[in-house]
Structures are given as structure tokens and as C-alpha cells.
Amino acid sequence: MKKPSLREFFNLLEKENKALRIKEEVSVKFEIPFITKKLEPYKAVMFEKVKEAKIPVVAGICGSRERICRALNINEEKLYDKILEALKNPLKTKIVEDGEVKEVKEKPNLKKFPILIHYNCDKYPYVTSAIISAKNPDNEEVENVSIHRLQVLDEKHLAIRIVPRHLYKLCQIAKDKGKNTLDIAISIGNHPAILLAASSPAPFGVSEFDVANRMLNGELKLIECENVNARAPANSEIIFEARILLNKLVEEGPFVDITGTYDAVRLQPLVEVVNVLRRSDCIYQALIPAGFEHKLLMGLAREAKIWEAVRNVVPTVKAVRLTDGGCGWLHVVISLKKQIEGDSKNAILAAFSAHPSVKHVIVVDEDIDVDNLSTVEWALATRFQADEDLIIIKNVRGSSLDPSAEQETGLTCKAGFDATIPLNKPKEKFEKAKIPENQKVKDILSKLNFKI
Ligand code: MN
């Protein structure tokens, strides 16, 4: 079996007509983001000729569920099990001496990489597909791997957005030990399993590399960096060996996050790149903020967790979706076969506890397709009464990404919508009527010169 890498996976997609190449010269400023955003639900894309750099750009790799399943070599029905199993049984990743990413070792010059400028009010190029790995200063056996946006300031400095999760905790531990810096490896151009694992809710103390390694059936290999104390995938395309300067804060932003709106500009830590490792013919990986890929990578493991939590209380759950319109993060639609009145409300509570960023949950019966939002709305219109079927929870912790949440305190109001048919009412009153079809009408329609 070939080693899991971004380029091997792109080649596989290309062979299966799931990826394409753009040969015209395009700019990192708006042009690559625009084309990628249009294409990503359908195809991954490689931009061979970039105006500002000699390095090609691959984008939209994980822009559809189908492509993520292809990367993990599974059918969609097995996706949640695969993610949950990897989270429960991380597999220790082997360290190797050498790797393709060590072909070139050079002084840092971020200007030579095709780093994108995405949206109209952006002021800086941003690296958005990088995974950041760091060891715990208290115990080097403990490692964290996560995805963070990186704002390019000059040839060797970046600003890094760190929300109060695991990397933040490692920074605090380093500070408590009197250190001014935390060593990190910034790896760009990786197999989708590594990105998916790095954005999954693995508990503190679990290396997301080991989660990815389980997804990849033990095929992942790591190298020790040469100039900093951190590990990185041996066949990444590019690694920036770097240090977070814990006491130097800079303004980070403006940046468009998963909601598609501009996130607040905040003071965030400065990063100094000390050295670059890369393949000689390296490919840069781009990821469009607020695009399908961003939402899927952030949301999928959360969706799996919600599915598991709902299944624990309502075993007849059929499907769970973090919807695209809900930013792949804030809205959940759950379909289930209600057996006892109240199952649907228990499902709402389970979803809120499984993913604290969830703001609205809609529960529908199993005849409603969670991917067809027009039908979900139809269920709300015909099966929901606000005075009985609405749960409102005020002043709870929500997502900092929601611009309508209280920005200072992070407090928000959550709502659950039970759009299932009440069990004590006649079911047929709520079912959608159908027009009977026969072969004759099917034949007439199939002869028409357009596809329905
Ligand atoms: Mn972690």
C-alpha cells in the first residue's frame, strides 16, 4: 500500500474523476479562493500556475462527504463508526528517521509560498490548512495536534489564533514553568485523515496523530523536527519549524470564520518560524474559510458525537446533520422513529450536551430527509406548535463564532424544535399525499428532452 499523503490522495481522486487541474495562471488573491469555492462540492482542484509563487496549490480536497469517505476507504454508513472508533482507540504512531518532507531544508521565507487572501475585507494572507503539533512541556509523551489559522505578517512571523482548548492549555503550562516560548511544528499538505483527526474532539492527553494513525490503519509515520522539539508527519508537503512567543501579542484579523462573517480582531500570540522543511516539488494546500471543506472538517467528528449521544437515549435515531446553512456547526437536524412521546425532546437535550456550540436543534420523523431542508421546513410548518414543541434555554455557553451571541460573555440562547407528529393524533393527517405513478407516465416523462 502507498503511504498516505496529500499527493497520493489527489492522484487517486484525479483517476476517479473527482479532481481537476487548472492550467491558466491565477492569483492567490481572490482568484484561487473564488474558483475553489465554486468547485469544492463537486471536485478537488490543483492550480498548476500561480502568479505569485512557483509552488502549485491544491484545494477543496475534503469538500464533500463522498471524498472524505474515499480518503478513509469506507462507505458513508460506516463514517461515524470509523471516527468514533479512532477516537476511542488511538494507535501509537511510529517515528522514523527520514521522510519525504526532509528533501529540502532552508531558511524561512514565507513570501515564496502561495498563501491565499480569501475575502473582500481581508488585509493579510492566511495559512488555513496547517496542523499545529506541540509537546506538553510537563510531559513530552503528551502531544496535541490541532488546526489553527495563521496570519502572515512578514517572511518569518505569523499571528496564531488559539481558542481556549488544548494548545492554549499547553501555552499556559509553558508559561507556568517560566518559559517564554513553546515549540511547534506547522505542517501543510497532509492526508485528509490527519486534518480530520486534528479537528476532532479527542480528549486532552490524546495525540490526534494517534487518532489519525488508527483511521489510517497504522500507516502514518512521524519525524522529529530538527530545530524545534516537535513531531510532524514524515510525508507532509511543507513543515515550518516554529516557536510561539508566549509574551508577544499582536492584532489577529480580520478573518472570515465558519459562519461566513468576519470574526473579531483580537490580540493573539506571535509565531516565529525558525526553519523550513519541504519536499523539493512541494504542493501547497489551501482550505477556504467558511467553505464546505472547512465545515465538514470541523463538523464531522462533532456530528458523529451527536449521533452517538442521541443513539444512547433514542436507539431509533435514523440520521443526524450539522447543516450547511447552520454553518456546519450551529444547527442540527435529527430524524428518528419516535416510540414514546418525549423521545424527540430527549434527543434535543442529548444533542445540546454532545456539542456545546449547537444553538438550534430540529427533530423530525423518519420520513423526513435531513439533507432536504425544504422538507425539514415542511415538517416545521405542519407538525410543530411553538407553545408545546419548543424548548428554550436562556443564558447558556454557546459558540464564540456566532455574531448574535453575547460577545463579551459568550452567552447565548438555545432552542430545540420538536417537529415530530404527536403520537396521540392520527398519523395519516400528517402524511404527505402522493399521486399514484405507473409505467406509462414514467415513459412519457423519460422521453422528454430534459432531466427532472
Ligand atoms: Mn487535543
Image: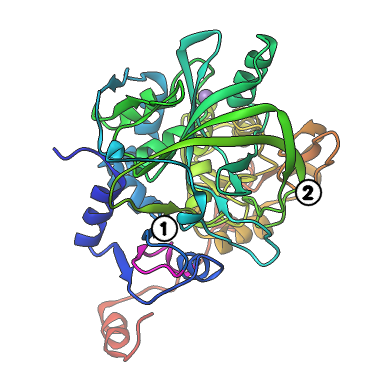
Q: Which residues are magenta?
A: 38-51
Point out the image quarter for the C terminus.
Answer: bottom left
| CA neighbours of label 1 inside 10 A, class few (<14), some (14 to 19), many (20+) | many
Q: Secondary structure beneath disc 1?
A: strand
> Which residue is rendered at x = 50% and y = 8% of the image?
139
The residue under label 1 is which amino acid type? Ala
Q: Is mark 1 within 8 Å of ligand 1?
A: no
Percent of width and height locating residue 398: 73, 36
Q: Residue 421 appears at what percent x and percent y? A: 61, 47
Expressed as whole percent of the image width and height from the top left, the position of residue 52 reads 47, 66
Tell me residue 240's x, y (percent): 46, 38
* Residue bearing mark 1: 59
Q: Residue furthest bottom?
A: 449
Q: Which quadrant: the N terminus? A: top left
- At x 63% / y 59%, what residue is drawn? 377
- Residue of label 2: 386
In the image, residue 47 sits, relative to residue 337, either above or below, namely below
- First-in-chain label (1 vs 2): 1
CB contact under 8 Å: marks 1 and 2: no
| Residue at x-position 69% and y-position 11% | 176
Kindly tell me whether residue 363 is visible in this rendering.
Answer: no
Residue 256 falls within the magenta-colored stretch: no
- In the picture, residue 221 is in which quadrant? top left
Image disc number at residue 427: none
> Secondary structure under badge 2?
helix
